Image (cartoon, rainbow, N blue to C red):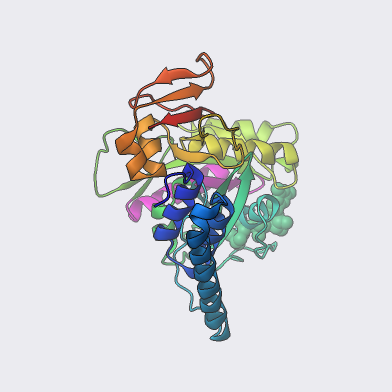
C-alpha cells in the first residue's frame, strides 16, 4: 500500500469494505477516487478503482432491469443518527418529513394515511440526520412492524397534535401501547436499566401544529398534564423557526460529536466531519479512520474550545464537538 494515503481516503475505503448494497459501494468508490492522491505511485490503484466503479454500475443497471426490489420492512441507518417519528394518527408526522427532507410522503387530512416507513435525510449544519416517517401508534390499529423500527432507531421524536382532543392522553396511550411491546419511552436512557427485556428509547416530545396555538396556552396546559418528566417543545411544519429548533434538538438528542481530522500542515475540510458518540476518545477516532492509525498513534494536536491552539493531547483525550484533530503517527 502506498504510504501517503490520507485519512479521508482510508475512511472512504473502509466505507467501501463495509458497504452492503451496490449503491453504497458506488458512492464509496467515487469518494475513494476523489480522495486518492494523484501521482505515479497511485496510478495502478486509481485504475483498479475505476474498474470497480464500472463493475458496480453494471450491477446496479442489471438489478434495475429486474424491477423494483420486494419490500422488506426495515430501514437501514444512514447519516449521523436515526430518528423515528412516533405519534397518534394525523398528528402531522408526514408533513414534517416533507418540510425537513427531500422525501415526499403522502399527507392527508384523514388518519392512517401512512402505511409504510418513509426515510428522509434532514440537514443539520454539516451533517445529515435520518428521519423515518411511520404509520401511527394507536389502539385502533398499528402495523405489526412499527415497534421493531422504533426499537432500532437511535431516538424517538414523539409528535403530538395540539389541536387534538387530549394530547397528553394520546402520549400516555402511546407509552402504554409501546410498553406492551417491551419499549419504554424515556427522557434519557438510564445508565443501569431496570429490566433488560425492555428497550429504553430516548424520546423527545413535540406539540405539533403550534401555529394553531400562537399564545402557547394549549402548550402550557398540555405540558402541565404531562408533568415535569418530559419537556414539551412546540413544533409546526409551517413555522421555519420551530423547524430549525427541531433540527438542533434532534442533533443534541443523538449525543454525538463532530470532529475534523486534518493532515499536518494541511487545511481543514469542514464538510467531512467524523461523527462519533459523545465520550469517544482520540483513540476511538484513530480507530474509526483506520485500525493501523490507532495502533501507531503517538499523540495529536487539537484546536477547539477551551484549549490553546495546537494543544498536544494523548489517546485518552475525550473529543468535543467541533474539535480539529491533527494525528501524529
Ligand atoms: N395547522 C397545522 N396543520 C398541520 C400541520 N402539519 C400537518 N397538518 C395537517 O394535519 C393533517 C395530517 O397531516 P399528516 O402529515 O398526514 O399527518 P400524519 O401524522 O402523517 O398522519 P398519519 O399518517 O395518518 O398518522 C393534514 O391535514 C395536514 O395538512 C401543522 O404544522 N399545522
Ligand atoms: Mg403520515
Quadrant of res 215: top right
Q: Residue at coordinates 47% horizontally, 43% vertically from top-left?
A: 7
71 or 12, nearer to the observer: 12
Is 229 left or right of 108, judged from the image as shown? Answer: left
Most extreme residue toward the front, as rendered? 40
Residue 148 place in picture, x, y as percent: 39, 59
> In the figure, is residue 286 to the left or right of 306?
left
Residue 293, given in percent of the width and then of the height, sits at 36, 39
The picture places residue 51, in percent across and down from the top left corner, at: 51, 70
Q: Is residue 107 above or below residue 65?
A: above
Q: Give the magenta part as a residue range.
A: 156-182
Q: Is residue 191 visible?
A: yes
Residue 136, percent across and down? 53, 59
Ligand 1 visible in quadrant: bottom right
Residue at left offset 70%, top offset 51%: 99
In this view, the residue farthest toward the bottom is 66
| Nearer to me, 106 or 55 | 55
Q: Is residue 229 left or right of residue 37?
A: left
On screen, residue 64 versus residue 302, left or right, reads right
Q: Residue at x 59, y 33 (%)?
A: 268
Q: Is residue 175 magenta?
A: yes
Q: Name the quarter where the C terminus is drawn.
A: top left
Within the magenta stretch, is there residue 153? no
With respect to residue 277, does 163 lie above or below? below
Amino acid at each position: 500500500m502506498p504510504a501517503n494515503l490520507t485519512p479521508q481516503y482510508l475512511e472512504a475505503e473502509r466505507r467501501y469494505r463495509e458497504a452492503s448494497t451496490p449503491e453504497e459501494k458506488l458512492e464509496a468508490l467515487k469518494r475513494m477516487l476523489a480522495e486518492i492522491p494523484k501521482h505515479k505511485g497511485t496510478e495502478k490503484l486509481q485504475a483498479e478503482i475505476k474498474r470497480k466503479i464500472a463493475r458496480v454500475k453494471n450491477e446496479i443497471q442489471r438489478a434495475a432491469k429486474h424491477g423494483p426490489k420486494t419490500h422488506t420492512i426495515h430501514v437501514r441507518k444512514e447519516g449521523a443518527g436515526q430518528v423515528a417519528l412516533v405519534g397518534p394518527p394525523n398528528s402531522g408526522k408526514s408533513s414534517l418529513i416533507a418540510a425537513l427532507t427531500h422525501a415526499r410522503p403522502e399527507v392527508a387530512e384523514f388518519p392512517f394515511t401512512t402505511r409504510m416507513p418513509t426515510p428522509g435525510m434532514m440537514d443539520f449544519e454539516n451533517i445529515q440526520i435520518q428521519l423515518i416517517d411511520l404509520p401511527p401508534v394507536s389502539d385502533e390499529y398499528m402495523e405489526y412492524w412499527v415497534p421493531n423500527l422504533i426499537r432500532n432507531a437511535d431516538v424517538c421524536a414523539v409528535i403530538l397534535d395540539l389541536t387534538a382532543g387530549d394530547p397528553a392522553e394520546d402520549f400516555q396511550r402511546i407509552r402504554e401501547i409501546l410498553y406492551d411491546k417491551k419499549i419504554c419511552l424515556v427522557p434519557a436512557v438510564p445508565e443501569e436499566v431496570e429490566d433488560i427485556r425492555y428497550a429504553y428509547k430516548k424520546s423527545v416530545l413535540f406539540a405539533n401544529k403550534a401555529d394553531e396555538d400562537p399564545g402557547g396556552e394549549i402548550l402550557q396546559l398540555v405540558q402541565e398534564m404531562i408533568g415535569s418528566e418530559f419537556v414539551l417543545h412546540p413544533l409546526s411544519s409551517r413555522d421555519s423557526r420551530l423547524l430549525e429548533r427541531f433540527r438542533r434538538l434532534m442533533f443534541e438528542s443523538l449525543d454525538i460529536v463532530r470532529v475534523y481530522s486534518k493532515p499536518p500542515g494541511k487545511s481543514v475540510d469542514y464538510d467531512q466531519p467524523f461523527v462519533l458518540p459523545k465520550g469517544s476518545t482520540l483513540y476511538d477516532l484513530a480507530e474509526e479512520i483506520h485500525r493501523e492509525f490507532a495502533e501507531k498513534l503517538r499523540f495529536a494536536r487539537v484546536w477547539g474550545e477551551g484549549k490553546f491552539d495546537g494543544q498536544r493531547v494523548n489517546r485518552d483525550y475525550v473529543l468535543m464537538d467541533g474539535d480539529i484533530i491533527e494525528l501524529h503517527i
